[in-house]
Image (spheres, rainbow, N blue to C red):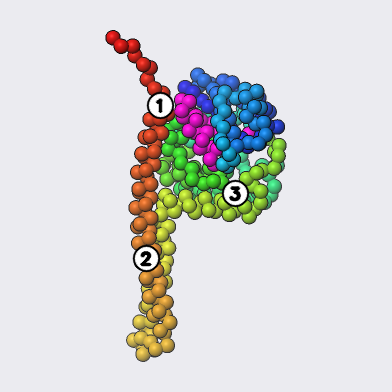
Amino acid sequence: MKLIIQIPCYNEALILPKTLAQLPEAIEGFDQVEILVVDDGSTDDTPAVARQAGADHIVHLSRHLGLAKAFTHGLDACLRLGADVIVNTDADNQYRAEDIHKLVRPILDGEAEMVIGDRGVGNTPHFPAHKRALQILGSKVVSATAGFDIPDATSGFRALTRDVALETIVLSNYSYTLETLIQAGARKVRVAFVPIETNPPERPSRLFSSIRNYLLNSSVTIMRSFTMYRALRIFTTISVLMLLVGTALGVRFLVAFFQNKGAGMVQSLILAAVFLIVGFMTFLIGLIADLVSFNRKILEEILFRIRKHDSEPEPDAQDPP
């Protein structure tokens, strides 16, 4: 079996050698362990430093596309290189390389298809208090959206099987962590979490530039993913609430009407009609969104088959008889 450790990088020339030096050269259960660095359009010497520090493969992106795109480009490259299991870690040395063996063990034992390193964000001492609170809140929201318990939603230290990597599609330009977990919940992927430790930060986070930035981007990602995979549920819920309000207002008008007080309750009749019409239209939008979601699933299956075919090694040419 082949394990590839992928590292998305953007201007990490100073920290990358330290990160690469700590990665294991061999892990029990794998015949090959290789390192792949994704250069996300760096303007420093990240590619040269990565090569000198021992990276086996380097993927160059022509311009800075962001962490999410770098992650997916890395997955594609790992699949083409024949990876059976892919481990993703950060270039800033946040995660401890000795924990990789804990990360891949549930996959080797057949207990999981995706494994996330749980940093214990509520108790991590070098996380600021506001960051710990936001991480806990974000994990609870993503848990409710994905449909299973997620203790650390934003951890980028994760391992996934070849099939899960083939199915992974990231649309966000911000980060891949939340969207891939929601996708995993929608696809019933077996996800496990293992406790890990982290190193003190080498530099400030580039994703967590401000609370406002974090909340805005995370909220957009969660809402988009939820409506993409559970469109009928969310639109039906909104529709039912509007229909109930409209019905209540309609009943209120009818009661007043039969009591000969309807002349003063015309506003209730108008509001009832508005809520009932909007509620019905919302339900129709939900049906259309569900059909679009179903069509997306078909497209994802087609993409999965194409990616699987493209990533399979070509059979050895046979000599003619």
The residue under label 3 is 136
Mark linked to residue 281? 2
The residue tagged with tag 1: helix, strand or loop?
loop
Mark linked to residue 232? none
Q: Is residue 278 above or below residue 152?
A: below
Q: Is residue 306 above or below residue 268?
A: above
The residue tagged with tag 3: helix, strand or loop?
helix
Numbered range of the magenta stretch: 68-92
* Residue type at numbered disc 3: Ile
Q: How far across and how far down the image is residue 224, in percent?
A: 48, 52
Given the current orientation, which residue lies at the most extreme front position? Answer: 62
Of callouts 1 and 2, which one flags the residue occurring earlier in the amino acid sequence?
Answer: 2
Hey, which quadrant is residue 300 in on the image? top left
Mark 1 Cα shell of 10 Å, populated few (<14), some (14-19), many (≥20) = few
Mark linked to residue 312? 1
Nearer to the camera, 83 or 239: 83
Q: How far across and how far down the image is residue 156, in percent?
A: 57, 38
313 sits left or right of 53 in the view: left
